[in-house]
Image: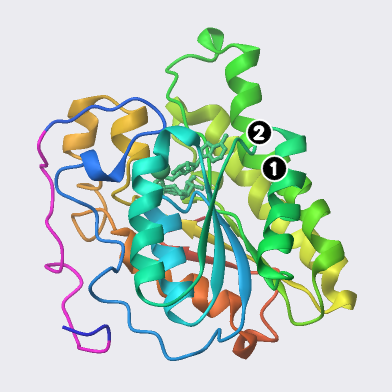
Amino acid sequence: MSQLDKKDPISLYPAPPYPTQDQSLPGLASAMDPKPDHGEQSYVGSGRLKGFRGIVTGADSGIGRAAAIALSREGADLVLNYLPDEQPDAEEVRDLLEGEGRRAILVPGDISSEQFCHDLVERAVAELGGLDTLVMVAAHQEVHQDILEMTTESIDETFKTNVYSLFWLSQAVIPHLEPGSSIVTTGSIQGNTPSPDKLDYATSKGAIGTFTAGLAQQLAKKGIRVNSIAPGPIWTPLQPASSDPETVSHFGEDSPYGRPGQPAELGAAYVHLVSPESSYTSGTTITIAGATPNY
Ligand code: NAD
Ligand code: MG
């Protein structure tokens, strides 16, 4: 079936309950049951990003992998960032994209380090000869029932990964971006409707929406667009790596579709935001949450 065939979104993917499963952070897509769909079989490109060069963070798995596959199939050459523990997932993505004739350069490393953020951008510029887009998908999520249990170390890890890295990567990349380039962030419906057990994560996701709206105005005169995707519940390693097995087994069950989204259901939105056809789209957030409200 191609992406252009009409299909019922409700019955398109398996619904919970899923087998109970547990992983530790950051988790691997290859260890999930059922396996997430990142668009490997379904995303069909049409040359919308021919000649584009980009960085995708969190590109080894989940939504970042789906974004990388979609951007690549539209013609973009990419640097893929992830954590060193995720090397097997990242190699799967690289092998797929290179097998299709695109460049996919693996640069593992921790974006909660300011120095690494700068190194990542410099490496990408050196490898690709310049940059046209920065697509930031990576995030850290932990579950804590009680604010009194939270340590400064864990709050730091969440904010440095989810928020500071946006500043550091943008600072490094902007001098390389020409008019017509774009930056894409990844928020969450948690930013507007926080779960009480994800206090630091949800607060960081609220900040990402604010960052996107503010930076878009700052960069408008440079002709650089800044936008965000706010996903609802999506079937990725973030869930078994940060939640208990029982919660994972029922993940997405309460959403209007009765199932979580699959990463493949987000790839086209990243393409839309990066594509030059979206020239008047800046400062916006696209919610992809299967009819779950985001307000
Ligand atoms: P995922 O685990 O597949 O992706 C998250 C990625 O973040 C990891 O693969 C890892 O490579 C990267 N990462 C984490 N810490 C890092 C660090 N310090 N340095 C470098 N990379 C790091 O999970 P996902 O669900 O695809 O998450 C992608 C994005 O989607 C995140 O921003 C997440 O907040 C957002 N999101 C996910 C959901 C969901 O239900 N899955 C819902 C809303 C928003
Ligand atoms: Mg991963």
The structure residue drawn at horizontal position 50% and vertical position 82%, both measured from the top left corner, is 75
Image position of 78 (left or right of 46): right
Answer yes or no: is residue 61 visible: no
> Magenta span has 132?
no
Image position of 61 (left or right of 269): left
On residue 165, which mark appears? 1
Answer yes or no: is residue 66 visible: yes
Residue topped by disc 2: 112
Q: Within 8 Å of ligand 1, the CB of disc 1?
A: yes
Q: Within 8 Å of ligand 1, the CB of disc 2?
A: yes
Residue at the far right: name it: 221
- Is the Cβ of the residue at disc 1 closer than 8 Å to that at disc 2? yes
Observer-nearest residue: 146 or 89? 89
Structural crowding at the residue carrying mark 1, measured as other residues with C-alpha within 10 Å and reported as few (<14), some (14–19) or many (≥20): many
Amino acid beneath label 2:
Ser
The structure residue drawn at horizontal position 22% and vertical position 85%, both measured from the top left corner, is 2
Image position of 88 (left or right of 286): left
Q: How many labels does the image show?
A: 2
Q: Where is residue 72 in the image (x, y as percent from the top left)?
A: 46, 74
> Magenta span has 6?
yes
Q: What stretch is highlighted in magenta?
A: 4-19
